[in-house]
Amino acid sequence: MATVAAYTSIASTAVGAYSAFAGSSATKANYEYQARLSEKNAEIAAQNVESIHEDQLQTVSDYREKISQTVGSSRASLAAQGFTVNDDADSTAWNLQQDIRDAGANDIMKIKKQFESEKEVARMAGESQTEQAKLYTKRAGQESPLLSGISQGASQAASVYKSGKQVKWWE
């Protein structure tokens, strides 16, 4: 009966050591996967910043075009009603057109501010993902499957020794 207990103790130690090794290997693999995923997310965030910037340029360009069209329409409308639409700075027509330009410039500032805010959010998300990737990489480097297995086996060594001594293996 003592021999069975000794063999059971050895088997238990071996299974425990292998389980610790396998668990640590799985944890390390998970950290490595999470690091790769975070790196990919950081790349996507950088692409988002560029995409938002391109959208900003296009939106501002389109809006400037609309302002020019609105100024042109108001100029045509004023001319049709008999107003002088020469570019005299003291004329009513010029003042109305300048008001449209000024309001448009204000709108463009708001549009740019909105896009800058979106870019900053995307930039911060990318930085966060980069830092997260560094953390996962560090944690993966701290995992040692072999050391975990050895440590688990060593913690059971006294039990194996005691069982072996009972069956007189260590004399």
Image: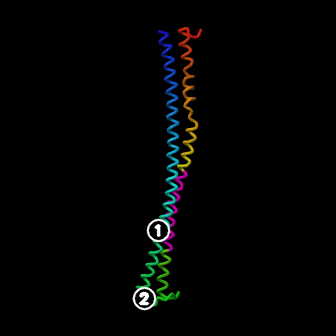
Distance Cα–Cα, label 2 vs label 1 = 30 Å
Q: Quadrant of the C terminus?
A: top right
Figure quadrant of residue 78 = bottom left
- At numbered mark 2, what does the secondary structure look like: helix, strand or loop? helix
Q: Main secondary structure of the magenta part?
A: helix
Q: Residue at x 52, y 63 (%)?
A: 116
The x and y percentages for residue 55 are 47, 64
Amino acid carrying label 2: it is: Ala
Q: How many numbered marks have been drawn onto this rendered protein structure?
A: 2
The x and y percentages for residue 89 are 53, 87
Instruction: Left or right? Give the position of 66 relative to 17.
Output: left
**Label 2 crowding class (10 Å Cα cut-off): few <14, some 14-19, many 20+?**
some
Figure quadrant of residue 146 = top right
Q: Which residue is mark 1?
A: 59
- Which stretch appears magenta? 105-127
In the image, which disc is placed on residue 79?
2
Q: Is 163 located above or below residue 29 in the figure?
A: above
